[in-house]
Image (cartoon, rainbow, N blue to C red):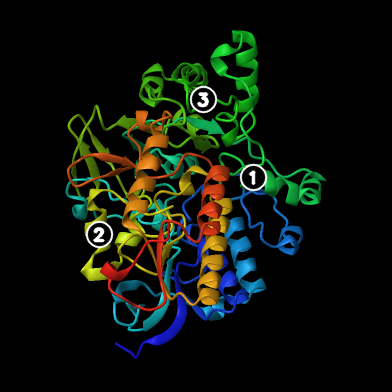
Amino acid sequence: MAEARTLDALVVGAGFAGLYMLIKLREDGFSAQGVEAGSGVGGTWFWNRYPGARCDIPSLEYSYSFDPELEQEWDWTERYAAQGEILSYIEHVAAKYDLKRSIDFETRVTSAVWNEETGRWLVETDRGKAFDVQFLILATGALSEPKLPDLPNLDAFKGPVLFTAKWDDSVDLKGKNICHFGTGSSGIQAVAAMSDYASHLTVFQRTPSYAVPANNRPLEAGEQEAAKAHYQEMRKVARHSPLGFASPPRPGKAKEFAPKDREQRLEEAWNAGTTGLLNAFEDLLFDAESNEQAAVFARRKIAETVDDPEMVRKLTPVYPLGSRRLCSEIGFYEALNKPNVELVDVREEKVVEITANEVVTDQDRYPADAITIATGFDACTGAIKAIELVGRDGQRIAEEWADGPRAYLGLAISGFPNLFAITGPGSPSVLSNVIISIEQHVEWVARCLTDMRESGDTVIEADAQAEQDWMHHVDEVAHMTLFPAADSWYMGKTRDGKQVFMPYVGGVGAYREKCDQVREAGYEGFVLSHAPVGAEELTPHT
């Protein structure tokens, strides 16, 4: 291992979070370096190059808000930008702020060990580089570590196996027999695109999704200019809204509307784009009766789009609308009507073997020249657990999180001093406009480091009781909603099989206020010290 480079901070990841963190650290006078596994910036949008990849948040809102000049100079072409356009935007940001010179690309952090005596982290990489840093900031993304499906004997397959989250776009799938696994957000997009050129496409589904038409289109003349004229007002509303959008849920409870009026509003919401349906009424995520009214509407829309009644049965979700991620679709249901596409429900037809050129179930055999996989992620925690992260007294993050992820405010982890996770478990992250949540986290962390520099404190750590109380609050708030009614990746698993809810559903605005209150109260719930000392000597700031 090379001699460790000494820095104030190391930022792991070069997506939206990592880039903005580097910008803020430079701006505030800290020495900082970024480390990124990919060969370029972009994070999610670097890796997810699968056919049909597109954002499900309107482009005008899925963008940085910290720089008014940046807002004005960038022009989007579509209502929902495709992967390539978003990556071009991120590359533009990296160039504008000259960030690439501060990032080591094609470099993975393999381990990070807390040094009790120095009060610093020793970080090692797979390139032999090492860093001695006061602060370790993980901007690794909540949805970045793919989850492998349980496909028996997959190693026997002789053709290409492609993951949507790590797509190899050099592989030509045109005219091929493709067996695809997964019908979540990425899978729905990929299926629609691949159906256009596959010789035959077999879609293996475990759990059907509610998919709402994106109603994507080119941005109309004057539309972008109008938004830019009011960008700051839009952003202010978004920062204090429940989900981080400029258009909050419409008032009124679905169950209290007359059927005709309710139908009209749901129809308007269905045609408004992906986020529109959940915004149709204010109580859809809280009231089972109101939710069922909207769910029945969505199920009927699926039935109206798909020709085969048996396929409709397989595609129709029975869980509450929105309790699993609401997906954005452009041609997914229409794709399933094509003669070269078929749907297999793996709950009813179990996959028993993968051969050199087939997927074999307990009922049939499906030819495959290629296998594509979109079975989701080890959400919120996977990319962090992938690092050999050793904290105070030898605590290892993978072991500590075996009984469910824990983090105070989704930002800091007890036993792991001077470590921050951007949009970690216990923050709004994946249940919000994530760019709004990223900016809030980055700005809070930067301000915290600045405050510590001014006060002379050198070590900060989440208090164990404060962390426990916060995670209890996160779970308590989740159970006031319909989210726990579905088995979803929002739920983390403990070693004894119990489930814990990971994202904070109390609202982006309410969460922002809580973080601000913590800081204003002298970092309540954190432990600060002026010098590295043993854990037993630290006193929480309360």
Q: Amino acid at mark 2?
A: Ala
Dot 2 or dot 3: first in sequence order is 3
Where on the picture, by quarter, is residue 389?
bottom left
Q: CA distance from mark 3 to mark 1?
A: 19 Å
What label does residue 398 carry, if any? 2
- Residue located at (45% from left, 60% from top): 47
- Residue located at (63% from left, 73% from top): 95
Furthest residue in direction bottom, as rendered: 3
Q: Which residue is mark 3?
A: 284
Q: Which residue is mark 1?
A: 238
Label 1: how many Cα within 10 Å (few below 14, some 14–19, many 20+): many
Can I make out residue 11 in this image? Answer: yes
Q: Amino acid at mark 3?
A: Leu
Quick one: 240 or 119, which is closer to the camera? 119
Secondary element at tag 2: helix
In this picture, is 466 found above or below 1? above
Mark 1 and mark 2 in contact? Answer it, CB < 8 Å: no
Quadrant showing the N terminus: bottom left
Can I make out residue 391 in this image? Answer: no
Residue 469: percent from left, percent from top: 36, 46
Quick one: 5 or 516, which is closer to the camera? 516
Label 3: how many Cα within 10 Å (few below 14, some 14–19, many 20+): many
- Residue located at (47% from left, 46% from top): 430
Q: Amino acid at mark 1?
A: Ala
Dot 3 or dot 1: first in sequence order is 1
Secondary element at tag 3: loop
Dot 1 or dot 2: first in sequence order is 1
Quick one: 170 or 434, which is closer to the camera? 434
